[in-house]
Image (cartoon, helix red, strand yellow):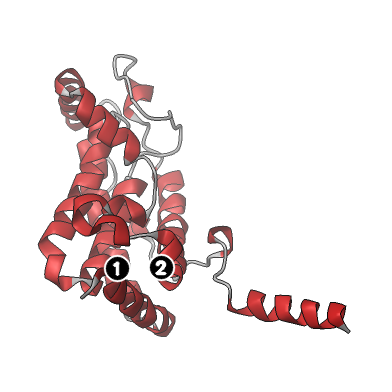
Amino acid sequence: MRTILAAAAMLALAAFAPANAEDAKPFTDAKTIDLVTILPPPPARDSDKTKAELAEILTLQVERTPEMVAHAKADDEETVWRFAGELFGPKFDKTKLPKFAAFFDRVVETEAAVVDPAKKTLNRPRPHMVSDIVKPVVKLSSSGAYPSGHTTLGTLMGIVLADMIPEKRAEIMARAWDYGHSRLVAGIHYPSDIEMGRISGSVIAVTIVRQDDFKAEFAPAKAELRAALGY
């Protein structure tokens, strides 16, 4: 009997436990948001635009400080928890925000579901694949550079997060823009990749906020976050 009761209790707990990040389902995908038909095509590898962008990357490569490099490396992690720091402090804690964490796991998966197919189709070579003078400070990638997935995600997370904490909208969006800029500092993207990532993140945000499943999970995640932060 005790074994049966224990098993029942474990099943009950499992039913209320938040899903693992790897189990998170995107709110939408590339079938609904086809970035290939929305964004202009990337500049050609041998175009004047690409050459000018490479020059900008190389200039930044010379000028970047150890602090900028450390920040860019930290921003290589694709997670909403990079918005902590001075914005929210220690109360912005994954272990204390299970509903919020599970909700943003779905947001992260949404970016990948929309952007990855577009990157594969558009297939713009990364800066270090075009010029061996470019020395990225993050893990090298051979996936398409356009649009920047990190920037798309940073913009998307910023918009959603700012809707939860409108009192800090300006600071949140400044951090979202900085998250994209870190990809330039890292030397892993072109400026136009960042620009298109910001557009892509905005398009995704405008689309998913209208969905019933998004609304259903947004409300409790917002309430949990605001309570934890004292808003």
- Callout 1: 10 Å neighbours few (<14), some, many (20+)? many
Foreground of the two, 55 or 165: 165
Residue 190 position by quadrant:
top left
State whether residue 105 is above or below residue 77: below
Q: Is residue 39 visible?
A: no
Foreground of the two, 202 or 66: 66
Residue 210 position by quadrant:
bottom left
Residue underneath mark 2:
97
The residue sitting at 31% across, 71% down in the picture is: 228
State whether residue 109 is above or below residue 116: below
Image spot of residue 199 (x, y percent): 23, 57
Indicate which label's residue lies in the foreground, 2 or 1: 2
- Callout 2: 10 Å neighbours few (<14), some, many (20+)? some
The residue sitting at 78% across, 78% down in the picture is: 6
Foreground of the two, 96 or 194: 96
Q: Residue furthest right?
A: 1
Residue underneath mark 1:
205
State whether residue 79 is above or below residue 164: above
Looking at the rendered image, the quarter that the N terminus falls into is bottom right
Q: Secondary structure at mark 1?
A: helix
The residue sitting at 17% across, 17% down in the picture is: 62
**Structural distance between the alpha carbons of marks 2 and 1:** 22 Å
Q: Secondary structure at mark 2?
A: loop
Residue type at numbered disc 2: Leu
Q: Residue furthest front?
A: 2
Asked if residue 61 lies left or right of residue 30, the reply is left
Image spot of residue 38 (x, y percent): 29, 59
Looking at the rendered image, the quarter that the C terminus falls into is bottom left
Image spot of residue 223 (x, y percent): 32, 80
Residue type at numbered disc 1: Ala
The residue sitting at 19% across, 45% down in the picture is: 178
Residue 162 position by quadrant:
bottom left
